[in-house]
Image (cartoon, rainbow, N blue to C red):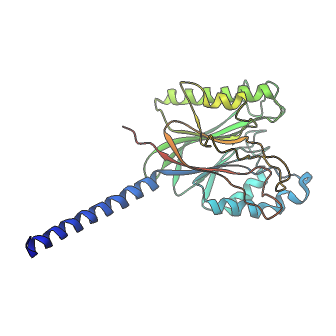
């Protein structure tokens, strides 16, 4: 081969390498733009009964943890109105949707959804009660000890234009029948929502479900042909999420989950176990999952 032929060959190889590199960067950028990181975090209500672990002594650690892991969207459970204000003050890049469960305004615990306000906008939002009268504020039914709610929002991704629905909830801690019926109610509500709008939108449901994987409420969430959900937690991951405040003080129970529709692939899952050497920031450990939206063909 002549010198000139060899030179042309080298140029062609270099050109191929260049286009492969550019394609790889574009592919990676696209994948990153389509990813969504979601956290579920029961932050424990503000009560003097917690003594050294009351909210005023751990606000900074909760805010710092959320900043550290930087979720795109996160759902909180047990947040009282003053705690919502503290989270807003400490997390300026986020906005939220949600109401207090007792009156549909500011009274009682929120199951709020925080989201990065520069990344998403809200198309629709709402809250319903886990009862036989879901639109009646403050209502409860069955054997529930406490009023329980679901807050949800339909999001528009400003970068990609894609839409998805995210809901956040907290099931009753005592009422077995209430937990079972709550799971059925949630599945039915969002199945009806998708049907009513004629769109099979991607769905994510975060929350403290007060149910182990072998119990009926959990099974109800993942069963069904019309709205089958997946647990973002790998089957081999048995890390508990409800541990109490003291590190290594009690056996942790798995009761906090991030469920998702078939539209998503879970790429990462993590039960966050950060602590200060003695105490966790809350009596629950936050759950963090990253999703890639499957391409629609």
- Is there any visible trace of residue 141 in the rendered image? no
Spot occupied by residue 123 in the image (x, y as percentages of width and height): 52, 43
- The quarter in which the N terminus is drawn is bottom left
Spot occupied by residue 6 in the image (x, y as percentages of width and height): 13, 71
Q: Residue 66, relative to residue 112: is it above or below?
A: below
Q: Residue 190, relative to residue 8: is it above or below?
A: above
Quadrant of the rendered image containing residue 72: bottom right
Spot occupied by residue 278 in the image (x, y as percentages of width and height): 83, 62
Residue farthest to the bottom, as pictured = 3
Q: Residue at x 61, y 31 (%)?
A: 222
Q: Residue at x 75, y 43 (%)?
A: 100
Q: How many marks?
A: 0
Q: Residue 245, relative to residue 105: is it above or below?
A: below
Q: Residue at x 73, y 51 (%)?
A: 285
- Nearer to us in this view, 65 or 63: 65
From the viewer's perspective, is 63 left or right of 231? Answer: right
Quadrant of the rendered image containing residue 111: top right
- Nearer to us in this view, 218 or 9: 9
């Amino acid at each position: 081969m002549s010198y000139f032929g060899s030179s042309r060959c080298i140029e062609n190889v270099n050109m191929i390498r260049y286009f492969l590199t550019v394609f790889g960067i574009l592919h990676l950028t696209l994948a990153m733009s389509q990813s969504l990181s979601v956290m579920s975090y029961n932050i424990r209500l503000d009560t003097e009964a917690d003594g050294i672990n009351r909210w005023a002594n751990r606000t900074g650690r909760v805010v710092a943890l959320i900043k550290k892991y930087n979720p795109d969207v996160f759902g909180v459970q047990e947040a009282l109105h003053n705690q919502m204000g503290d989270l807003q003050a400490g997390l300026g890049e986020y906005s939220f949707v949600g109401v207090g469960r007792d009156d549909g305004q500011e009274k009682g615990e929120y199951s709020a959804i925080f989201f990065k306000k520069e990344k998403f906008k809200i198309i629709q939002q709402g809250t319903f009660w886990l009862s036989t009268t879901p639109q009646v504020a403050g209502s409860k039914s069955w054997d529930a000890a406490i009023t329980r709610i679901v807050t949800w929002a339909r999001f528009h991704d400003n970068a990609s234009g894609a839409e998805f629905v995210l809901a956040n909830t907290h099931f009753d801690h005592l009422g077995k029948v209430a937990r079972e019926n709550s799971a059925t109610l949630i599945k039915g509500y969002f199945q009806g929502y998708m049907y009513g709008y004629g769109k099979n939108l991607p769905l994510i449901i975060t929350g403290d479900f007060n149910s182990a994987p072998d119990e009926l409420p959990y099974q109800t969430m993942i069963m069904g042909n019309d709205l089958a959900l997946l647990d973002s937690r790998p089957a081999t991951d048995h890390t508990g999420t409800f541990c109490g405040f003291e590190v290594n003080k009690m056996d942790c129970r798995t009761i906090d989950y991030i469920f998702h529709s078939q539209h998503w692939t879970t790429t990462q899952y993590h039960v966050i176990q950060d602590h200060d050497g003695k105490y966790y920031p809350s009596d629950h450990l936050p759950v963090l999952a990253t999703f890639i939206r499957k391409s629609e063909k």
